[in-house]
Image (tube, rainbow, N blue to C red):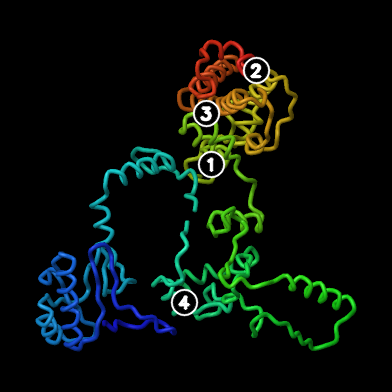
Amino acid sequence: MLEGFRVGRNKTRVSHLQFADDTIFFSNTREEDLQTLKSLLLAFGHISGLKVNLDKSNIYGINLDQAHISRLAETLECKASGWPILYLGLPLGGNPRAGGFWDPVIERISRRLDVAAKIERLQRDFLWSGIGEGKKDHLVREMVVEDPREGSALWHQVILSIYGSHSNGWDANTIVRWSHRCPWKAISQVFQEFSSFTRFVVGNGERILLGPTRPFSWNLNFRRNLSDSEIEDLEGLMRSLDGVHLSPSVPDARLWPLSSSGLFSVKSFFLALSQCFGSPQVFPSKFVWNSQIPFKVQSFIWLVTHKKVNTNDMLQVRRPYKALSPDICILCMKQGESADHIFLHCSLTIGLWHRLFQLAKMDWVPPRSILDMMYIKFNGFGSSKRGIALWQAANIALIRIVWRERNARIFEDKARNSESLWDSIVFLASLWAYCSKVFKGTPLNAILLDWIAVCTP
């Protein structure tokens, strides 16, 4: 009943948009069309029992003078308004590239932050840069889901109408005149990699086009005579194609083999791209996040393995004008301080590591980096649940205690010997183990006295 307007080359029609109880209707300026719209609204009110309040409704014109808009408003018995406007808190009708265009939105969001958002902000600030006054360093950059949509969805139709579609019928066209700010341009840059991971499943043959004729027939014409090896390849291809049969009741589908469900996910594609372009070693997530230790400490270990804690070498990069001088490890006073050195290769730290491995009756060679140390699956206290939990706790407690000692020496001018540090490691790891589910019912003093005994089934 309402013509609305048309979008793109496919002339996709948009007559109205709805959000919750707000609706926008698009119409031409003919009074009979507006009378039809008014009748529709009144009929809707009678049928649903919901009254449409025309007094609170507004009409806006595009390329119309205000007098004409006022006459149309009288027809609809609503208000005549002009541009720009705020709709659902967002500005419409202005210049989005202007500096002050989005100021009302920013002010509105800032003014209406709810409690959950404030709590989340506090958590984020604590994790990334700490809480308090003054400029803080961001320890790490913030890392970077998508639900499938039906092909008949309005937004899907609008995108296809503007950018066109690929010959396979699924993807947007990759050769169009795109603005440098268009997000589809960036998406298209990984189209080749995306295509290499997809698989097509033949059903009724309506969307997968293997030839101009149906049912399938093969009449291959080549520009030259085939060689003997090419003829053998062609015969193998034809034998494979003999097993292709249409299933009229099953639609064609595209399969994403990188996920168990067969559906595309951003995570699986991101991991595949990372492997293609040679990403760094994978973070040992199970060792850290599955450990029975406080989340705050897990987050700290995550920073350590990414070498993002504020060691001297990182401070030289982040704040060269405030970096510590001299750049030397406060624990051994022999070498420069870095994450790999202070948590692994420092003479004080490596002595603690040797003591831990001696307790587990294991010979070891220090790995190259702290990330490797977390990644290697040492069978420290056995393969039982208790053994794994206590080994994880001991490793993480050692790193935590070393960092505390480093800070105490720098900021408090206090130092402890290796024996005192080892006692702290044993107590902290035992306490974490005692609080875990796998050690439920085991006294804390029993864990403190003999790690090997409490981990033996």
Residue 33 image point, x, y percent: 20, 85
Q: Are marks 2 and 3 in contact (CB under 8 Å)?
A: no
Say which residue label 4 marks. Answer: 160
Foreground label between 4 and 3: 4
Q: Is residue 247 left or right of residue 25?
A: right
Residue 121 image point, x, y percent: 35, 45
Residue type pointed to by label 4: Leu
- The disc, 4 or 3, on the residue closer to the chain's N-terminal end is 4
Where is 195 relative to 431, above or below?
below
Say which residue label 1 marks. Answer: 308
Say which residue label 3 marks. Answer: 292
Q: Distance between the residues labelled 1 and 2?
A: 37 Å
Using the image, tell me which numbered label, if any, was put on residue 456.
2
- The disc, 3 or 1, on the residue closer to the chain's N-terminal end is 3
* Quadrant position of the N terminus in the picture: bottom left
Give SS at disc 4: helix
* Quadrant position of the C terminus in the picture: top right
Residue 382 image point, x, y percent: 67, 24
Residue visible at 11% across and 85% down in the picture: 71
For label 4, the crowd category at 10 Å Cα-Cα, with few meaning under 14, some 14 to 19 and many 20 or more, is many
Where is 324 relative to 234, above or below?
above
Residue visible at 85% across and 83% down in the picture: 226
Foreground label between 3 and 1: 3
Give SS at disc 3: loop
Residue type pointed to by label 1: Lys
Q: Distance between the residues labelled 4 and 1?
A: 43 Å
For label 3, the crowd category at 10 Å Cα-Cα, with few meaning under 14, some 14 to 19 and many 20 or more, is many
